[in-house]
Amino acid sequence: MTKLFVTDLDGTLLPTGQKVSAANIAAVKKMAAVGITVTLATGRMYKAALPVAVQMGVNVPIITYNGALIKNTDGKIVHADYIEPSLALEVLRFFRERGWYIQIYSDDNLYYIERTAEAEGYEQAQKISGQAVGENITAYTNHVAKLLSITGGGDETDERVKIFNDYFGGRIKAIRSNENYAEIVNPNVSKAAAIKILADKMNIAMAEVTVIGDSDNDLPMLKAAGKSIAMGNAVPEVKAFCDYVTTDCQADGFAAAVEKFVLNESQTL
């Protein structure tokens, strides 16, 4: 039976921004009422994820930066896996040499060289603001949880991920989180690893964890959980693996999944 329910954000709990639907909030409250702990695991920065956690009524640590930072809603850090400053600097130079867009997160602040269309689109989607710092971006390499590459589409993202991972040879990794985003984090960082850390602290077995997600970077946590649910809008690989598939994010597939596969758990075993 589910003791810990972990949800991805973008494309799962909400389509964009920071506003959670009434149906999805009601579903979270129903789980809490029967003793299920609910939290989130996202590629988002803590600053962008916190308002969502507050709407959900979450008061346990949340998993951000694709697993690199676990932090309480009161701001206390539970676990952090920051990229070494010298390696972050090397990544910045790698992207700069190729003319590829890159943004960096230092001390939970967002920085980019200039405010391009990529930066503007990201800010609008996440409902946050970053800072254009020009070539001084190399000064922001302390407490870096991740960097993010933004491309024009899925093929470009996949190609960039391959080129990056081949070049760095496992010292750091890039993973696609949606059609346009490639998350750059330390090699051992994943949502799955972070959930295991959190579950251990809560004395919950991974078999008692249910996870819901939609994208490539959700696969590790879906594979690690006792029960896995794919969104109707999930990528084919996620749908193929998961125990269950719900409806689309736009149609409150999260709430539908909670009702069908969690609150009526005994009927789905």
Image (tube, rainbow, N blue to C red):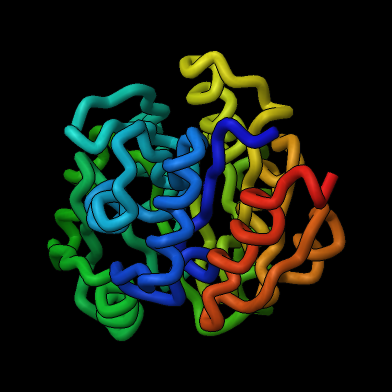
Left or right: residue 247 versus residue 249 is: right
Where does the image place residue 250, in percent across and percent down from the top left?
A: 52, 82
Quadrant where the image shows the C terminus: top right
Residue drawn at point x = 24 percent, y = 37 percent: 73
Where does the image place residue 107, in percent across and percent down from the top left?
A: 20, 40
Inspect this view and state whether residue 149 appears: no
Residue drawn at point x = 16 percent, y = 67 percent: 129
Q: Is residue 201 above or below residue 87?
A: above
Where does the image place residue 258, in percent across and percent down from the top left?
A: 60, 57
Pick the residue in front: 4 or 237. 4
Left or right: residue 79 versus residue 200 is: left
Left or right: residue 242 versus residue 210 is: right
Pick the residue in front: 8 or 215. 8
Where does the image place residue 229, in percent across and percent down from the top left?
A: 71, 56
Quadrant where the image shows the N terminus: top right
Residue drawn at point x = 23 percent, y = 56 percent: 51
Count numbered badges in the picture: 0
Q: Is residue 30 above or below residue 62?
A: below
Residue drawn at point x = 36 percent, y = 71 percent: 22
Left or right: residue 214 versus residue 38 is: right
Quadrant in the rendering for residue 160 = bottom right
Pick the residue in front: 68 or 113. 68
Inspect this view and state whether residue 198 appears: yes
Q: Is residue 241 above or below residue 234?
A: above
Q: Is residue 151 above or below residue 97?
A: below
Pick the residue in front: 30 or 42. 30
